[in-house]
Image (tube, grey):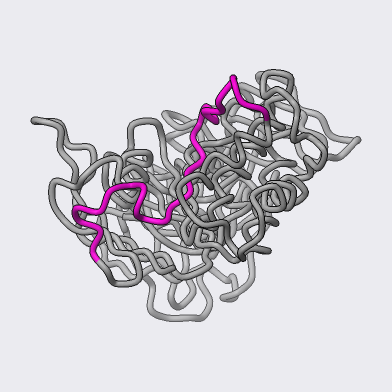
């Protein structure tokens, strides 16, 4: 089933929950809505399911408007955040509940359908168990089997793993993705967990304040965030606001340093506590580079379409910052160092900024609070955002 939202808005009195949301989910796609609490994710899901009616706009299934179509006639399976299992029914009875209102898919018996679904979610033999005797992960899988029992063309999952611990959540999200892929059912998944959204989705929509900030495949959303909000919400990022100073148009020698090369290590401190580079001797000016001033410190960027005087916001991921490396260097003071196995997460105080650096683990190097550390990034490691 192909799902379309066309200019959907939802208002409750003077409060706006959704504003002009337009999305298209392809047949068989695993599509995730991600964003902070209160951004409109669940409201969007409820409009799709028919639990809420849009104030404006339309929801379409395979091109057919769902205006006036009640939830039970939309052919949608829903897994809620709290699972909503019936405590007075056995696991098998819970899974079979949705079959009371529709014909069993494939013409098999209800018992066979229940058995097939419990096997699909790795709960074979649990038919007679009491839901209260199951773990949170097992209850989540029963809720999934119940949603799939009528053979829905569209599956909606509203933060179904938020109550589970991190390790179990990671294992179950892989299982959900496997089941969705095997069945080929169009799926809309809601989560506030960015890593979860990136890990399991074919495409992601980032919501903020009831609006869609960006839609794309996970890799593009992570590497090329469109707005400052997406840059800061999806994974860690270092975001800088600056002003374009100059854009050299020629190559050659500047102060005796050949274009494409680099002078030796930079010494001294800039006005913002950074390694001085604004007027450094031997500064390199290459065709296509742009000089941007951030709090009195100049950075050299490449691939930037801007003119002197323009305001510019750009971001650099922590993994693209290197200790004592990179063309653009700054000096910060260590305010936090977290050992995370393969990396150490450094947080540096740099003027009015807190800089995050992902340092590959090295047994010969350690960082203490108060240490001054020089880090840098290459001119092409940045991404400009709105």
Regarding residue 382, the answer to whether it shows in the image is no
Give the total number of marks visible in the rendering: 0
Q: Is residue 99 above or below residue 204?
A: above
User: Where does residue 182 sit, x and y in percent of width and height?
Assistant: 68, 64
Between 374 and 12, the residue placed more toward the observer is 12
Quarter in which the N terminus is drawn: bottom left
Residue 322 coordinates in the image, percent (x, y): 68, 48
User: Residue 367's spot in the image, x, y percent?
Assistant: 76, 27
From the image, which quarter does the C terminus lie in? Answer: bottom left
Q: Position of 155 compared to 19: left or right?
A: right
Residue drawn at point x = 33 percent, y = 42 percent: 46
Residue lying at 58% horizontally and 30% vertically, measured from the top left: 348
Q: Nearer the viewer, residue 199 or 221?
A: 199
The answer to whether residue 358 of the structure is visible from this angle is yes
User: On screen, 98 above or below 254?
Assistant: above
Q: Position of residue 35 (x, y in %)?
A: 42, 41
364 over 222 or under it: above or below: above
Q: Which residues are magenta?
A: 65-90
> Quarter-wise, where is residue 225 in the image?
bottom left
């Amino acid at each position: 089933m192909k799902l379309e939202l066309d200019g959907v808005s939802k208002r409750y009195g003077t409060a706006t929950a959704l504003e002009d949301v337009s999305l298209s989910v392809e047949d068989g796609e695993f599509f995730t809505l991600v964003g902070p609490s209160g951004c409109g994710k669940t409201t969007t899901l409820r409009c799709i399911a028919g639990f809420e009616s849009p104030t404006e706009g339309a929801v379409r299934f395979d091109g057919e408007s769902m205006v006036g179509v009640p939830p039970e006639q939309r052919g949608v399976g829903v897994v809620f955040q709290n699972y909503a299992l019936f405590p007075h029914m056995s696991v098998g009875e819970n899974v079979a509940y949705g079959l009371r209102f529709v014909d069993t898919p494939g013409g098999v018996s209800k018992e066979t359908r229940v058995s097939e679904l419990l096997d699909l979610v790795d709960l074979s033999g649990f038919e007679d168990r009491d839901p209260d005797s199951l773990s949170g992960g097992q209850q989540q899988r029963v809720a999934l089997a119940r949603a799939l029992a009528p053979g829905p063309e569209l599956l909606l999952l509203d933060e179904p793993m938020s109550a589970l611990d991190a390790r179990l959540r990671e294992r179950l999200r892989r299982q959900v993705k496997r089941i969705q892929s095997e069945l080929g059912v169009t799926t809309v998944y809601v989560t506030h967990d960015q890593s979860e959204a990136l890990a399991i989705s074919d495409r992601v929509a980032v919501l903020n304040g009831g609006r869609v900030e960006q839609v794309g495949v996970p890799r593009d959303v992570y590497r090329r965030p469109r707005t400052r909000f997406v840059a800061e919400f999806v994974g860690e990022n270092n975001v800088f606001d600056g002003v374009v100073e100059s854009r050299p148009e020629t190559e050659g020698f500047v102060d005796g340093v050949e274009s494409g090369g680099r002078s030796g290590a930079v010494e001294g401190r800039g006005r913002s506590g950074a390694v001085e580079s604004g007027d450094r001797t031997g500064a390199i000016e290459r065709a296509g580079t742009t000089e941007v001033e951030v709090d009195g410190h100049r950075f050299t960027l490449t691939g930037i379409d801007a003119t002197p005087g323009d305001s510019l916001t750009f971001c650099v991921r922590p993994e693209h910052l290197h200790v004592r490396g990179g063309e653009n260097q700054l000096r910060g003071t260590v305010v936090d160092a977290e050992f995370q196995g393969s990396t150490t997460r450094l947080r540096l105080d740099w003027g009015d900024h807190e800089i995050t650096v992902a340092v590959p683990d090295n047994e010969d190097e350690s960082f203490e609070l108060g240490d001054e550390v020089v880090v840098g990034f290459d001119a092409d490691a940045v991404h400009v955002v709105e």
